[in-house]
Amino acid sequence: MVRQIAKNPLSLAGVTIIAIFIIVAIFAPLIAPTPAGQMNPYMIPRDGYYAEPQSPNAEHIFGTTQGQYDIFYGVIWGCRSAFRVALVVMGITILVGIVLGSLAGYFGGVLDEVIMRITDIFLAFPWLILAMAITAVLGQSLRSVMIALVIVWWPAYARLIRGDILQLREEDYVEAARGLGASSLRVIVRHVLPNSIYPMLIMASLDIGAVVLSAAALSFLGLGAPEGYADWGQMTEFARNWIVGPPGEPFKYWYAVFVPGVFILFFVLGWNLLGDAFRDIFDPRLARR
Amino acid sequence: MKDLIRIRDLTVRFYTYEGVVYAIDDLDLDIRQGETLGIVGETGSGKTMTALAILRLIPYPGKIESGSIVLLGRDHQSGLELLKLKDDRMRSIRGNKISMVFQEPGAALNPVYTIGDQISEVFLLHRRQGLGREAKQRVDGLLSNGSGPAAAVKRPFWRWQSRLYSKIAEGPNPLEPRILSHIPLFRRLLWRLRDEARLRTIDMLKDVEIPDPDRVAGRYPHELSGGMKQRAVIAMALACSPELLIADEPTTSLDVTIQAQMLELFRRIKVDKGASVLFITHNLGVAAEVCDRVGVMYAGRLCEVAGVEEMFLHPLHPYTKALLDAVPMPGKELQTIPGMAADALNPPPGCRFHPRCPSAMPMCQQERPKPKEISKDHIVACYLY
Amino acid sequence: MWSGWQSVLHDQVESVAGASLDIASDGRKVKRPPPASGGLLTFSKGLWYKGGALGLRAYIVRRVLLLIPVLVGVTLFIFGITMLFSPLERATLYVTNIRQLDNLPAVIEKYGLDRPFVIQYGTWLGQVLRGNLGWSQVISMRVGEALIRSIPATLELAIFAVPIIILTGIFFGTRAAAHKDKPFDHATRVVAIMGWSLPSFWLGLILLMIFYGYFRGLLPPGRLSITAGILVDSAGFIRYTHLNTIDAILNLNGTVLLDALRHLILPVATISVINVAFIMRLMRSSMLESLGKGYILTARAKGLAERVVVNKHARRNALIPVITVSGYLFAGLASGAVITESIFSFQGIGWFAWQAAVRLDIASVLGFALFSAFLFVIINLIVDILYTRVDPRVRLGQGVQ
């Protein structure tokens, strides 16, 4: 599998990009050290309170955005918060999806119906509006965003697992296992789930990009990370007021808009490339089944 | 009997990722007018490729490397070299002079168009002038017989249509109708062509013994059974009275009972239409039922060709004998052919069959045996003769 | 988000087709889930397949019946959220005019906001069905009214964006499939993945930076410039549809039309870029799958020109999944293109929902959520029904044998 990833130039690019982000995230404290005395490293240090963004200079490599928040610090630690959001949301979503999807798929009947109707209900909402409603009710913070995203995303995974299980349930080795007296839980965990991992992997790797995009969007809309938090979406929101510079210098504050966005773009791009590659690799297996 | 198709030195190679495959290797074959020639062989022997080569439909990554396929017959007394034809001329041969029936009728039919539409398509493509003539006749009939105020109003339209259709009847690809067909609303003016085509389609469906052809024509492929679908495909192939009908394992995917009906249909076709049939199959029994002559192919080469009785009573090539022996018979122990089918990428040198041949001689490994006519109409490529 | 669509697409198509339909999009090849169970509402084969009209009618009935529990669930969900608040806070959900705000206890009394859950739900549902989504103190108007005012803008966006997305996506997807593995194909793939990875809000900002900042107000945000706004509000301009472009045409007013179009270009472009990438890849893989099928060989063997084979035979089949997805796309856009609307201050449903969320206008947010869900579900239903028109295999249920 590793060889296959290496062969395809696009997937190689994807893996490289993600690797770079991982490294940056891990070494964030070294790359962009938190100023002494600051408690929460995720809050971007401010160099004053002046509103107008400053251009990149020696002290602020990427310049500062509205309120003199250092852009460089923000985007570096933003890698960390992006991964945090992605892993937490994906992790919980997959967990909830597996549990509910397995219950629905394996036991069928009324339980299946009920769970499916519940997923229908959640899927009936356009995702962003649902997420906005939830963050409005829960209060605006990164935690609400994560909860909102889990709520928006789990139905798709539950459905996917359910579908897999419905098919695998009929396979001979499952019957054999049951015939030998294995309990339902054991059958699900040991026999059915391992075989349904692959499509889920694909979907998950493609969705990590979407999760981060959505979280950034929510923060951009002012519903997520608090002001001054090291979050790419939040930083883009700052830049919102500065997209047009004074007459004669229309691109004066380009860095405030460009930099956080570019980080989002490449992060999502990397995961999309990887997901594409996964799909190409695991495709024959999917088709065979 | 006169020849219809002469294939000489045909070589088709496939350039795959793993290497070059000789799908057809220096093949010589004649198809005579009015005969049903069977080609028998294992999967991978090159039978389907031969059929596709005749129509020049070899898919990528295959390529017709060399050879000649000449079409003779009523319109081409001096022979038409098919492999050298330009694309548009070749297209006028496909579906028209030479047509093909495939193995899986379900796959061969487009699920989003009705049966009638798909068959009419052939008429609209190849018999446009004839359709134009018939349409013009119909309109002229309206012009002369029509009476009353309704007719008076429509008269100018009819006159225009009559002119239009006579243009179609004359030319290949006349200008005015062609322009009209591109303007969405005016396209409907050519509806009479479609009507005529539909009439012919229904006649065609009757010919292949499909019950209630009118309703069936309006149905979609998924609404028909396998046997009906195959009949429809045959109707599509026979629409323009081709000189050669190529049937690639037409009965393999059908029930045995339907198979019998299908073979009966093929026998009738031979008698009624007088077309030659190239019948490809791996089932010797089917070949015995339907064919006049039979050819046996192995690994892209022709082993033996003979009249059907001659072939089954006096098989000469060891492979043919082995095939016949392998047919399961009650009371007889099941015979198999030892060894594996020739590896397409690294075929055995010399005669392809020699590793599995009970009568192999040292000479068989060195050079490929040339086909020799042993008795009347019985050709074998083997060093035993 | 997309994965959600995919699984929704699957299950709804499944319940229609009863057969496995694989949406092979290059971004998402989702496995074939078995049909979504219709449970008690699974009609026997007989009812399905009396042919033509009855089959379709039965299908529509079945789908609508399946829809009702979902809609009920949606209302329950929203209502459940409202119950997280105190009766006093909830009172505004029942207010219909501003004077009632002075006497909230009377409202509580009138609608029984201290009664048991079920009764309250009933009352609330009754009000909702009557169109009363409550009063928003933040915007000082009835939520329902705010909704209705903001629909036209979003509709206008959707009407312009969706055809562009579909046509462009189909065109490039078909060409990429026809030139598989050649430079055009690779270029499309790269462009598609990049477009797909773009944050829409960032794209919008960059576009504004260029076309509004650098080009000095060439393509400004908002729906209309001030002058055009005055024209539109004037007596001589009749509002037929509240869609600026259509009204401008109907009023034969070129200035307003041009102005409205100028303001539409950037939002439509922003929405389009990202969605075109998706449709393009979907069309490509759909075309490739179609071109590999047996009927293509038959078409060639009939003597049809390659162009006809591709356009008439291959494309018609390849379009089927694309059309369905486009339908869902329209549904998604119509129910709220929040980000784009917020960036360009395009005052549609999404914009209002955003404003409400930011200003903690719970009544509005919940009202919009409810409305959006209903709209989304109904448009999806219409798309599913249209799908039966598009794919003959699905029209009558199971086939004749």
Image: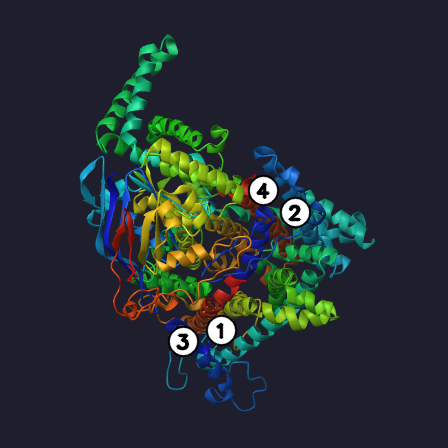
The color scheme shown is: rainbow
Contact (Cβ within 8 Å) of mark 3 with mark 1: no
Q: Mark 3 lies on which chain?
A: A
Residue C208 vertical position relative to residue C11 in the rendered view, above or below: below
Pick whichever, B127 or C345, lies toward us: B127
Image location of residue B51, percent across then percent down: 33, 49
Mark 2 and mark 4: span between their CA atoms? 19 Å
Q: In this view, does A234 lie above or below C319?
A: below
Dot 4 crowding, Cα within 10 Å, few <14, some 14–19, many 20+: many
Q: Mark 3 points at which residue?
A: A12
User: Tag 4: residue type?
Assistant: Gly
At horizontal 47% and vertical 78% (from top left) the residue drawn is A75
* Residue B261 percent coordinates (x, y): 49, 38
The percent coordinates of residue C38 (x first, y second) are 67, 49
Q: Which of A94 and B205 is in front in this view?
A: B205
Q: Where is residue C143 in the image (x, y as percent from the top left)?
A: 63, 50
Q: Nearer the viewer, residue B60 or B209?
A: B209
Front residue of C345 and B201: B201
CB-based contact (under 8 Å), mark 2 and mark 3: no
Q: Residues within 10 Å of mark 2 (few under 14, many from 20)?
A: some
Q: Distance between the residues labelled 1 and 2?
A: 39 Å
Q: Which chain carries label 2?
A: C
Quote the CA–CA distance across marks 2 and 3. 45 Å
Q: Do the residues labelled 1 and 2 touch (CB within 8 Å)?
A: no
Q: Which mark is residue C397?
A: 4
